[in-house]
Amino acid sequence: MTVTFNTLDEFRALLKTAPHADQNALSEAADRNGQLTKPPGALGRLEDVALWYASWRGEAAPQISAPQVIIFAGNHGVTAQGVSAFPAEVTAQMVMNFEHGGAAINQLAKTFGASLNVHALDLDRPTADFTEGPAMTEAEVVAALQTGWNAVDANADVLVTGEMGIGNTTSAAAIGAALLGGAAADWTGRGTGVDDAGLANKTRVVEQGLAANAGRDGLEVLRKLGGRELAAMVGAIARARFGQIPVILDGFICCAAAACLEKEEAGALDHCVAGHLSAEGAHEKLLAGIGKEPLLSLGLRLGEGSGAALALGVLKAALACHSGMATFAEAGVSDA
């Protein structure tokens, strides 16, 4: 689906035309689930996840054969405020590592049979420091949204979006506070490992960013407090909806981006499931804000799409059971 949008208003209008889950496929999948050789509900959330996936793919017994992982990378002007334990140069260095196959996400994507694509967005041109005003112009955020939209493979049958960007936990904290309320300290964590003084500084920066950028509209919050990689994830998640491609959300930063989409258009994340609960303290609050229950909780705080890629294994297992198990009739087993 090739779509071009030139303004945020055009993107907003597009979101309102997004398709919904296939209720017939959901009903057929539920009927199948009720006939499988197991006690009702014996597979717990695996059953729920399988039915959710079936409803978005429009099939009673679907399988996953073409998962896609996309990593978006961007640099943040707010790093000038000393919010990260690592310098901004690390973003480009990690992009190179992704491209050479040396990162954790490369191994996870390979393990679960996913293609991996990496998109670096103007790393030599960081966003503006949001303590002084909006991080991006409308043209910049629209360009990033379009990059994300165009990055999705139309033949994918599940999508994982990941990110890399030094300073982006600060951006995500500011987005969470702007969209869901509460004090900056409630949303600000240690990210890549700042010490107590660094955490206090990071909290101050989030407070200044909120003060400098009024407004609580989802896409405007993304423009003012986000980054190019967050906007690209929003574009990719939205594009997946139009292709009936289910999405597994990653950690704190990915969910902050997704929250902008949900705030803009209620129900915009119905085709998404939360892959995991990360070790970033405010992630649980953010998940509650977008109404998602994580599939995994393993203490991860890496980003890169790593937690969502692990959850891809859970989703594939759910579909393998749902679509591959025999029914009572097929197995010759009495169901009464």
Image (tube, grey):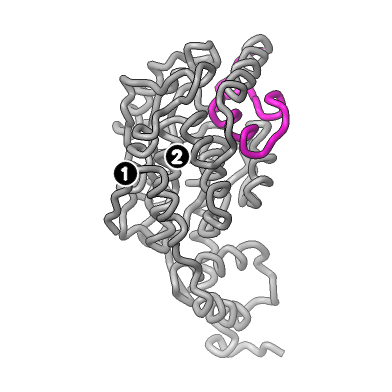
Which region of the structure is painted magenta? 169-195
The image quarter in which residue 163 lies: top left
**Residue 10 at x, y percent in the picture:** 38, 49
Task: Decide which of 126, 246 is in the foreground and name it.
Answer: 126
Residue 267 at what x, y percent from top left? Answer: 56, 57
Say which residue appears at 41% left-offset and 47% top-offset: 9
State the separation of the CA atoms marked 2 and 1.
24 Å
Numbered mark located on residue 335 in the image: none
Camera-nearest label, 2 or 1? 1
Can I make out residue 314 in this image? Answer: no
Question: Magenta segment: does it hold 144?
Answer: no
Return the mark for residue 162.
Answer: 2
* Secondary structure state at the residue bearing disc 1: loop
Residue 190 among magenta residues:
yes
Closer to us: 335 or 20: 20
Quarter of the figure with residue 255 = top right
- What amino acid type should be assigned to the residue bearing mark 1? Asn
Residue 320 seen in the current view: yes
Instruction: Report whether 60 appears left or right of 179.
Output: left
Mark 2 or mark 1: which comes first in sequence? Answer: 1
Residue indicated by mark 1: 6
Amino acid marked by disc 2: Gly
The answer to whether 95 appears left or right of 208 in the picture is: left
Image position, residue 23 (x, y; %): 53, 76
Please tell me whether residue 162 is drawn above or below residue 41 in the rendered image: above
Residue 204 image point, x, y percent: 64, 15
Residue at screen point 48% across, 25% down: 134
Image quadrant where one finds the N terminus: bottom left
